[in-house]
Image: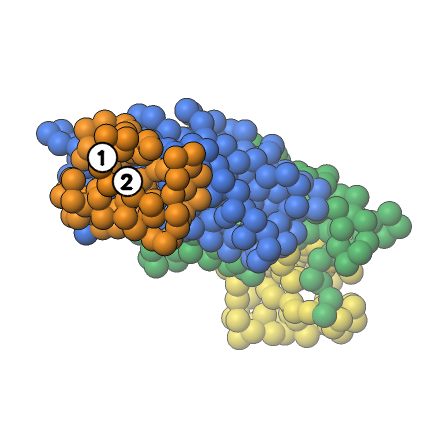
Chain colours: A blue, B orange, C green, D yellow
């Protein structure tokens, strides 16, 4: 695998990921983009605010890439999370993988977003009209 | 000994870090630190989970902590 | 679901797909891009040439979108295949889906590329140094 | 009756469409058409599969075909 791109940024540029993953040895590229949705549990969401323990989050993201590349033959990987205030439709995370065959890029991409949500120290606050809630904080 | 706080942990304590130097009983392990936090700020007991990172790695309850470690409270993560 | 984008084109612009899929009701976008790989069975591929029975291919692509949207709650869909000569690294197909939750976008995207490869009347010729081969033509 | 040819089917026949008007026995069904092609161009027998589309839809061997139908030979597809 080539050196992965692992970043925490203010703003995600979705147009650059294809160039970052394009690869002569790859026949398949799978990209997942997480975006801000306008409703949660029937309540209208105004925006999300993301906060990261940046140094640790980058280490945990690197572990996810290492785990995925041990499980599947990956050629190029991008894993990039945004922080700060994000409005409806804005991208908050982008994960992309290029592999020789399509099965591995789908499976690895899915593994990486699922694991990121479980282990990477990033927190999301949902802003509603009259309140704000740290997601998953309470049972 | 300074503890870094994120997300709802910062909201519960009311600041982005907690200085334990004024406390009589300093925690020597992650478990003791969590116990101390639960006592001092009962809202920590209401969280779905509570982890502690020592020098940027998730630490077990038995992990020892000292003056020079970077210690952070990790409330339930919700990235992505 | 909004009206899907179903196209057969000369050249795929990978930078436009995010705007096409971006959607206030979607929290997840999954995009698959098929690209030209430099090797097949240890032989160096110079280029691929794609040919389509265009009118029928568009109908079959529309059927795939209908089937996927009957199985999963899709918000926006793009399915775009290229024809003509494609060099190594060039995109030949792009399939993207936006959904409220990520499970459906991964599953639907995978279903659509798998089905496209089985049913859509498009043919690929691999150009090697000294020969060319219609892919899958022979057992 | 003109048959549209794609991919390796075009290579086998050597042109992009096949006019059956000069044939004595015109095929009345998809099955008869495939039989005719296999006889006239034995290389069709070597393909992994061979389908026929009538008016842009995959057709069964029993499907009837007539002068006004758009008929296309669909060798094994390999898009994506």
Please tell me which residue lies in front, C88 or B62.
B62
Name above or below for residue A106 compared with residue D23: above
Q: What percent of the width, then of the height, locates residue D5?
A: 68, 55
Q: Residue B26, labelled with which disc?
A: 2
Q: What percent of the width, then of the height, locates residue D44?
A: 74, 68
Q: What percent of the width, then of the height, locates residue A74?
A: 62, 49
Q: In which image quadrant can residue B19 be found? A: top left
Give the side of residue B12 with respect to residue A96, left or right: left
Q: Secondary structure at mark 2?
A: loop
- Seen at 19% across and 29% down, the residue is B14
Please tell me which residue lies in front, C12 or A107.
A107
Q: Name the chain letter of the residue that bears numbered label 2.
A: B
- Seen at 31% across and 40% down, the residue is B73
Q: Secondary structure at mark 1?
A: loop
Give the side of residue D53 with respect to residue D3, left or right: left
- Seen at 27% across and 33% down, the residue is B20
Give the side of residue C44 with respect to residue C85, left or right: right
Q: Residues within 10 Å of mark 2 (few under 14, many from 20)?
A: some
Decide: marks 2, 1 in contact (CB < 8 A)?
Answer: yes
Q: Residues within 10 Å of mark 1 (few under 14, many from 20)?
A: few
Gap in angstroms between the C-alphas marked 2 and 1 = 6 Å
Name above or below for residue C46 compared with residue D46: above
Give the side of residue C66 with respect to residue D79, left or right: left
How many discs mark residues in the rendered view?
A: 2
- Seen at 18% across and 35% down, the residue is B12
The residue that disc 1 covers is B23
Q: Is residue A69 visible?
A: yes
Q: What percent of the width, then of the height, locates residue A89?
A: 33, 32
């Amino acid at each position: 695998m080539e050196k992965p791109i692992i970043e925490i940024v203010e703003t995600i540029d979705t147009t650059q990921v294809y160039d970052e993953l394009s690869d002569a040895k790859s026949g398949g590229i799978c990209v997942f983009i997480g975006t801000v949705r306008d409703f949660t549990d029937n309540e209208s969401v105004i925006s999300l605010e993301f906060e990261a323990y940046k140094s640790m989050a980058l280490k945990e993201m690197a572990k996810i890439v290492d785990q995925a590349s041990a499980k599947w033959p990956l050629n190029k990987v991008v894993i990039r999370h945004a922080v700060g205030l994000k409005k409806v439709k804005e991208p908050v995370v982008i994960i992309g993988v290029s592999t020789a065959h399509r099965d591995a890029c789908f499976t690895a991409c899915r593994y990486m977003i699922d694991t990121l949500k479980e282990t990477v120290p990033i927190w999301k606050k949902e802003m509603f009209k009259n309140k704000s809630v740290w997601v998953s904080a309470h049972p | 000994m300074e503890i870094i706080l994120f997300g709802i942990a910062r909201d519960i304590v009311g600041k982005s870090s907690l200085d334990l130097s004024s406390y009589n009983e300093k925690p020597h392990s992650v478990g003791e630190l969590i116990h101390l936090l639960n006592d001092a700020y009962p809202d920590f007991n209401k969280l779905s989970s509570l982890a502690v990172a020592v020098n940027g790695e998730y630490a077990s309850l038995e992990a020892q902590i000292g003056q020079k470690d970077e210690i952070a409270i990790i409330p339930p993560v919700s990235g992505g």
